[in-house]
Image (cartoon, helix red, strand yellow):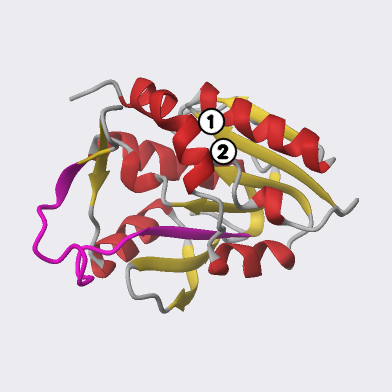
Amino acid sequence: MDNQQQVWNNIAPEWHKFKTSPSVAATEFLNKSKGKILDFGSGSGRHLLKLKKSRKRELYLVDFSEEMLSLAKKRAEKLGIKINTIISKLEKTDFPDNYFYAAICTAAIHCIETARKREQAIKELFRILKPKAKAEIEVWNKNSERFKKKPKEKFVAWRDKGLRYYYLYDEKEFQEFLKKTGFKIIKRIPHSANIIFIIEKPSYQV
């Protein structure tokens, strides 16, 4: 397996030019959110940097690709948007417990190479969200037309820059994955290719 951090650093400039449109579901969710907002696995910032400027929001982008975050910073400076960028794997960050009022995690969890690391990442998201905070989360859907004949684990080439890893969830599996961590599923958003949920960290954890 290629070093995934290096792969994403290698493809960052082309990815930044290609991936410019934000997720509709993520945008609708973010427009209703205030306070400290996290993009967990942000890439080069196509979601948060499309938001209208607001003093009611503090924007945080976390990704393990320093090249992606460098491009996000350049775009933010050009747009006059203040952002906080943190280079980190999603499995462990340095944020305090109960820190964020809202988060998005769009097409990021399925890029993590092992089941153990994916579980660590979703537990980390749970830890750093405030009680009652909500998040919008998306992964590719194994049962979609695009992927139903594909294996659960697959590698996708980006020209000659390397092979990107993906794990394909089915909907029931992903629901159980989130609930096991402690998240409450608030809403399912229909989509032809992705599994999309609005989830909430409950006020009290058992």
**Viewer-proximal residue among 52 and 195:** 52
Name which residue lies at 26% across and 44% down.
166
Describe residue 74's horizontal placement relative to residue 175 as left or right.
right
- The numbered dot on residue 68 is 1
**Mark 1 is on which residue type?**
Met
Describe residue 169's horizontal placement relative to residue 86 as left or right.
left
Q: Which residues are magenta?
A: 134-155
Name which residue lies at 70% across and 37% down.
75
Q: How many marks?
A: 2
Tell me which corner region of the image, top left, top right, bottom left or bottom right, holds residue 174. bottom left
- The numbered dot on residue 44 is 2
The percent coordinates of residue 76 (x first, y second) are: 74, 38
Assign a secondary structure to mark 2: loop
Mark 2 and 1 residues: CB-CB less than 8 Å, in contact? yes
Describe residue 190's horizontal placement relative to residue 79 as left or right.
left
In magenta segment, residue 191:
no
Describe residue 193's horizontal placement relative to residue 202 as left or right.
left
Badge 2 density bin: few <14, some 14–19, many ≥20, Cα 10 Å: many
- Residue 197 vs 129, above or below: the answer is below
The percent coordinates of residue 64 (x first, y second) are: 48, 27
Q: CA distance from mark 2 to mark 1?
A: 4 Å
Name which residue lies at 29% across and 37% down.
158
The percent coordinates of residue 51 (x first, y second) are: 74, 57
Residue 96 seen by the camera: no
